[in-house]
Image (spheres, rainbow, N blue to C red):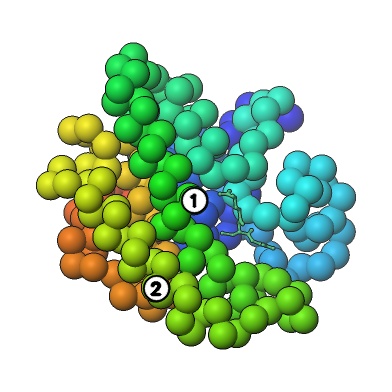
């Protein structure tokens, strides 16, 4: 088994969070771009990939004997592994609580209308898709989540505390997802994302998915 980290991903999807993080940490890794159209043995439902990720989803990260499949768990693992970069608060329990609050808000509130849209546009089997939900409901929910997020962010430069953390990768990728799906993104959040995307690590991760 390779001692290099391997990331299985797909374009700007949630796996991009991990790709960006790997670039931020300057870790060596192999990137495997999944072909979701491949329904065969080497595809996402084939035995090799299914043994690592039983849902056939991305991201999957392999680091030695460790196989991890949830994007936030992967970000937190990598941040802990490279402790010296301070990409996750570890010793200040109040700051760590705010970090957890932000990350959980992003995945349980902000991301959900976006994922509902994805599910009802392409991810669910056709007979389970409900088109009405993605014309109205999701936009109402996303707007509400954005208003709360702006309160959580206050006038800070970063998602949590006073420095860049994995929460910024999570948040900037999620706002980018909303823009890709043509949701109306409030100016404060669009500006925040534009600032985060000025990082070299973002440019490098983009170059990987565009290669
Ligand atoms: N909670 C998981 C969600 C993973 C997920 O749903 N990934 C999407 C791409 S963003 C996927 O692979 N979808 C394929 C499917 O649902 O069949 C995470 O954050 O890693």
Q: Which mark is residue 204?
A: none
Mark 1 burial class by Cα count in 10 Å: few <14, some 14-19, many 20+: few
* Position above or below: 176 against 88: below
Residue at horizontal 54 percent and vertical 44 percent from the top: 71
Question: Label 2 neighbourhood size at 10 Å, few (<14), some (14-19), many (20+)?
Answer: few
User: Residue at coordinates 35% horizontally, 33% vertically from top-left?
Assistant: 99
Residue 207 is situated, as x and y percent measured from the top left of the image, at: 40, 58
Given this view, does label 1 or label 2 mark the residue nearer the observer?
Answer: 2
Q: Say if mark 1 contacts mark 2, CB within 8 Å.
A: no
Helix, strand or loop under label 1: helix
Across and down, in percent, residue 127 comes to 77, 81
In which quadrant is the N terminus drawn? top right
Residue reaching furthest left? 155
According to the picture, the residue beneath numbered tag 1 turns out to be 108
Residue where numbered disc 2 is placed: 140
Q: Is residue 48 left or right of residue 139?
A: right
Q: Earlier in the sequence, mark 1 or mark 2?
A: 1
Residue 111 as seen in the image, left or right of residue 59: left
Residue nearer the viewer, 92 or 43 = 92
- Ligand 1 picture quarter: bottom right
* Residue at point 27%, 37% (across, down): 160
**65, above or below 186, in the image:** above
Give residue 84's position: percent from left, percent from top: 34, 19
Alpha-carbon distance for marks 1 and 2? 15 Å
172 or 131: nearer the viewer? 131
Ligand 1 lies under 8 Å from the Cβ of mark 1: no
Disc 2, SS: helix
């Amino acid at each position: 088994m390779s001692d290099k980290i391997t990331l299985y991903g797909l374009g700007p999807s949630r796996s991009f969070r991990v790709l960006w993080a790997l670039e931020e940490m300057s870790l060596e890794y192999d990137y495997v771009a999944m072909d979701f159209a491949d329904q065969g043995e080497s595809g996402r439902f084939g035995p090799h990939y299914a043994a690592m990720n039983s849902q056939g989803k991305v991201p999957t990260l392999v680091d030695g004997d460790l196989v991890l499949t949830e994007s936030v768990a992967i970000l937190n693992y990598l941040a802990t592994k490279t402790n010296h970069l301070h990409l996750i608060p570890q010793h200040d329990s109040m700051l760590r609580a705010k970090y957890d609050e932000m990350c959980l808000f992003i995945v349980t509130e902000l991301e959900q209308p976006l994922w509902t849209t994805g599910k009802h546009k392409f991810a669910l089997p056709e007979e389970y898709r409900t088109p009405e939900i993605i014309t109205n409901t999701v936009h109402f929910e996303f707007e509400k989540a954005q208003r709360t997020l702006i309160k959580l962010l206050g006038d800070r430069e970063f998602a949590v505390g006073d420095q860049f953390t994995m929460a910024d990768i999570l948040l900037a990728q999620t706002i980018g997802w909303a823009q890709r799906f043509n949701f109306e993104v409030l100016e404060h959040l669009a500006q925040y994302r534009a600032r985060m995307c000025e990082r070299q690590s973002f440019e490098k991760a983009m170059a990987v998915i565009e290669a």
